[in-house]
């Protein structure tokens, strides 16, 4: 007889992969994102962003 705890130890079957988006859809999404973020890219980074970039540039010990 199987119990609930036995069911938890059964490996879950992976979900089937969904097909990739059509190239036209990816293109439209890219155009939309470029339009949405165009102003952000041209602005100077905030002090928080500058600090984050400095941290990312430092090698880990």
Image (tube, rainbow, N blue to C red):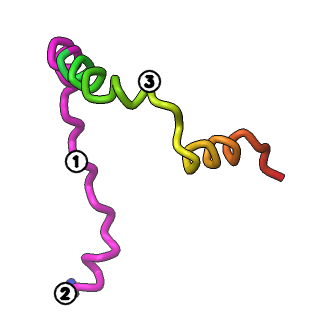
**Span shown in magenta:** 4-27
Q: Residue at x 22, y 87 (%)?
A: 3
Up-down relation of residue 57 to residue 15 (above or below): above
Q: What element carries label 1?
A: loop
Label whose residue precedes the other's in the sequence (1 or 2): 2
Up-down relation of residue 24 to residue 12 (above or below): above
Q: How crowded is mark 3: few (under 14 residues within 10 Å), some or many (20 or more)?
A: few
Q: Which residue is drawn at 19% across and 87% down?
A: 1
Between residue 15 and residue 6, name the one nearer to us.
15
Q: Name the residue under label 3.
A: 42
Q: Position of residue 42 (x, y in %)?
A: 44, 24
Front of the two marks 1 and 2: 1
**Which mark, by number, is residue 36?**
none
Judged left or right of residue 2, residue 54 is right
Q: Is mark 3 on a helix, strand or loop?
A: helix
Q: Is mark 2 on a helix, strand or loop?
A: loop
Q: Residue at x 39, y 31 (%)?
A: 40
Up-down relation of residue 15 to residue 17 (above or below): below
Between residue 28 and residue 20, name the one nearer to us.
28
Check if mark 1's residue and mark 2's residue have beta carbons within 8 Å.
no
Q: Residues within 10 Å of mark 2 (few under 14, many from 20)?
A: few
Q: Mark 1 points at which residue?
A: 15
**In the figure, residue 31 lies in which quadrant?**
top left
Q: What whole-number distance in Å separates the C-alpha atoms at marks 3 and 2?
A: 65 Å
Label whose residue precedes the other's in the sequence (3 or 1): 1
**In the figure, residue 53 lies in which quadrant?**
top right
Q: Name the residue under label 2.
A: 1
Q: What whole-number distance in Å separates the C-alpha atoms at marks 3 and 1?
A: 41 Å
Front of the two marks 3 and 1: 3
Between residue 17 and residue 54, name the one nearer to us.
54
């Amino acid at each position: 007889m199987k119990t609930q705890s036995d069911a938890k130890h059964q490996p879950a079957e992976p979900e089937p992969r969904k097909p990739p988006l059509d190239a036209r859809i990816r293109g439209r999404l890219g155009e939309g994102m470029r339009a949405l973020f165009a102003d952000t890219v041209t602005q100077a980074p905030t002090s928080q962003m500058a600090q984050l970039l400095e941290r990312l540039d430092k090698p880990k010990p």
